[in-house]
Image: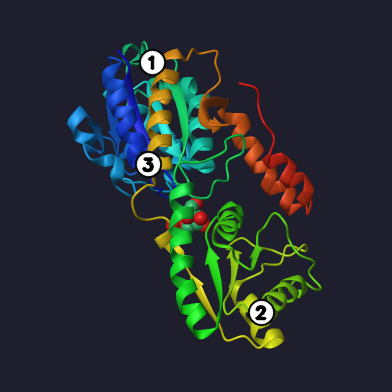
Amino acid sequence: KKKIGIITSGGDAPGMNGAVRAVVRAAITKGCTPYAIYEGYQGLIDGGSMMKEMQWEDVRGWLSEGGTLIGTARCAPFRERWGRLTAAKNMILNGIDALIVCGGDGSLTGADLFRSEWPGLLAELVSTGELAPEQIQGYEHLTIVGLVGSIDNDMSSTDATIGAFSSLSRICQSVDFIDATALSHSRAFVVEVMGRHCGWLALMAGIATGADYVFIPEQPPNSEKWGDEMCAIVHAHRKKGKRKTIVIVAEGAIDDQLNPVTAEDVKTLLVKKLGLDTRITTLGHVQRGGSAVAFDRMLSTLQGFDAVDAVLESTPETPSPMIGITENKICRKPLVESVALTKSVATAIKNKDFQKAMALRDTEFEE
Ligand code: F6P
């Protein structure tokens, strides 16, 4: 009977509660014991009441709740070996031999590192007398399964991360609100959206709201004349009688020399070159809050169930899987490769190889 820990880690995302609910209930259905680990990896390090056995009714009503009810953190101690040693010890003491981690690429990288170090961590705990040799018997293999929870939709090899569509929805709703006031005053608004180094939220919001122009990290404009095209397009729209202007700027937007393109820069251009009365709206954490849209409830539930199946099917030989979705089907991808691919997109952007970055985002793995 497996004891499965479920962790939410990194920035919260709508749908994380749905994932926890699905894991808890699938685990119980399949005869396993689910444990909620509170406050991300910190809960593994602190142990005790931070690791709680969950019952079916503990997750009642969680599907529609925003954020993550078991807490999350970007846990610095887990990046240190002593932190992972303490986490391993607490897992053994609670009999937990499988972890399902719902988080972004950083959290999933940490998870896989933990798995790769696992036998060594146990050996060290025994050699330092923290655990007796018989305590680690039966725990030689740690099973890790990744669920991608992030509003940024920045993970390669999956079409959607849990939370991205909820955040997109919130952005669209906010832009609709801004539209009304922009139209009334015939103003321009520069709307800054999240996404870290990924332009998915900005681009999709631009399409979904009919924005005049979008700045994203993956397609940076020429540094010498980065605003020319935007101004020409906005000017043309205005000449056709449009009373409002919406420019969406991804928080990670850059020019082709990697200089940031900020909402303030864009505003200055709209004022100076086009004489538009311009305001900036930084949507901030509103984009991350609120309840999950139907897609994220569905995604988190189906993926949470599959994560438990993946735990049960895992062998010491199989690489840690990440549960994704491609072409509308829930799928499993090798976690390490998916994370590495995601990182290579960032590297390509740093090397100003923007075409490569776009191609890498589209790379697929065979299942
Ligand atoms: O990764 C999710 C995200 O919301 C990013 O879009 C954003 O850059 C970052 O987290 C903000 O982090 P924090 O909540 O720590 O300010």
Q: Earlier in the sequence, mark 3 or mark 2?
A: 3
The image quarter in which residue 333 lies: top right
Q: Earlier in the sequence, mark 3 or mark 1?
A: 3
Q: Which mark is residue 238?
A: 2
- State the quadrant of the N terminus: top left
Identify the residue at image location x=28%, y=29%: 35
Disc marking residue 139: 1
The label nearer to you, 1 versus 2, is 2
Identify the residue at image location x=75%, y=75%. Answer: 232
Identity of the amino acid at label 3? Met
Nearer to us in this view, 295 or 3: 295
Residue 207 locus on image (x, y percent) = 60, 57
Look at the numbered disc 2 and give the secondary structure of its residue. Answer: helix
Amino acid type, label 2: Arg
Disc on the earlier residue, 1 or 2: 1
Question: Residue flagged by tag 1: what amino acid is it?
Answer: Tyr
Q: Is residue 58 visible?
A: yes
Kindly state the secondary structure of the residue where label 3 is placed: helix
